[in-house]
Amino acid sequence: MISLNTDFPDLSNDEIEAQAHSLLERYFGRKLVFDDVPIPVEKIAEQLLDYEIEIIEGGPYFEGDILGGIVFDDRVIQVSAAVSNHEGRYNFTIAHEIGHIKA
């Protein structure tokens, strides 16, 4: 079940960028290089952060512009089936949910 949480820390763009780089360097085990694209968001979620990715068919939370969610207690990232065949949107949704994890 997804609950909409509006209690976010107010981070600057520089802080967000630094945290993203730190996460990627942890995943790759080294400093980032130009060739580290595309970013393997699915592997980062599952292997580094130990989250399961679950495709959800419909439901009350996946309407309109809500395409993903995260269940912290169960360590599950939920993605709407509506984007599962659109690689770019699928990856973006997983990356967005990873951004909510305090890692």
Image (spheres, rainbow, N blue to C red):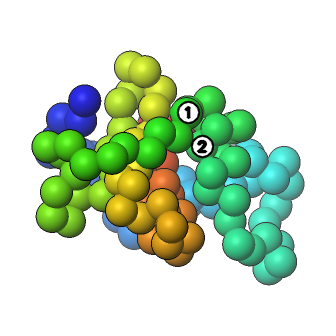
- What kind of element bears circle 1? loop
Provide residue 9's location: percent of width, then percent of height.
27, 46
| Amino acid on which the number 1 mark rests in the picture | Tyr
Q: Is residue 43 above or below residue 88?
A: above
Name the residue: 68% across, 65% down.
Answer: 39
Task: Check if mark 1's residue and mark 2's residue have beta carbons within 8 Å.
Answer: yes
Q: CA distance from mark 1 to mark 2?
A: 5 Å
Q: Is residue 29 above or below residue 32?
A: above
Does residue 76 appear in this view?
yes
- What kind of element bears circle 2? helix
Whichever of labels 1 and 2 marks the residue nearer the N terminus, that label is: 2
Going by the picture, which residue comes out furthest to the top? 73
Provide residue 48's location: percent of width, then percent of height.
69, 38
Provide residue 64's location: percent of width, then percent of height.
15, 64
Does residue 11 appear in this view?
no
User: 4 or 34: which is nearer to us?
Assistant: 4
Name the residue: 20% across, 43% down.
Answer: 59
| Count of labels in the image | 2
Quadrant for residue 31, please give it: bottom right
Going by the picture, which residue comes out furthest to the front? 57
Q: Which residue is mark 2?
A: 45
The N terminus lies in which quarter of the figure?
top left
Where residue 96 is drawn, which disc sits there? none
Left or right: 99 as drawn, with respect to 3: right
Left or right: 94 as drawn, with respect to 26: left
Q: Which residue is mark 1?
A: 51
Name the residue: 74% across, 54% down.
Answer: 25
Q: Residues within 10 Å of mark 1 (few under 14, many from 20)?
A: many
Left or right: 99 as drawn, with respect to 87: left
| Amino acid on which the number 2 mark rests in the picture | Ala
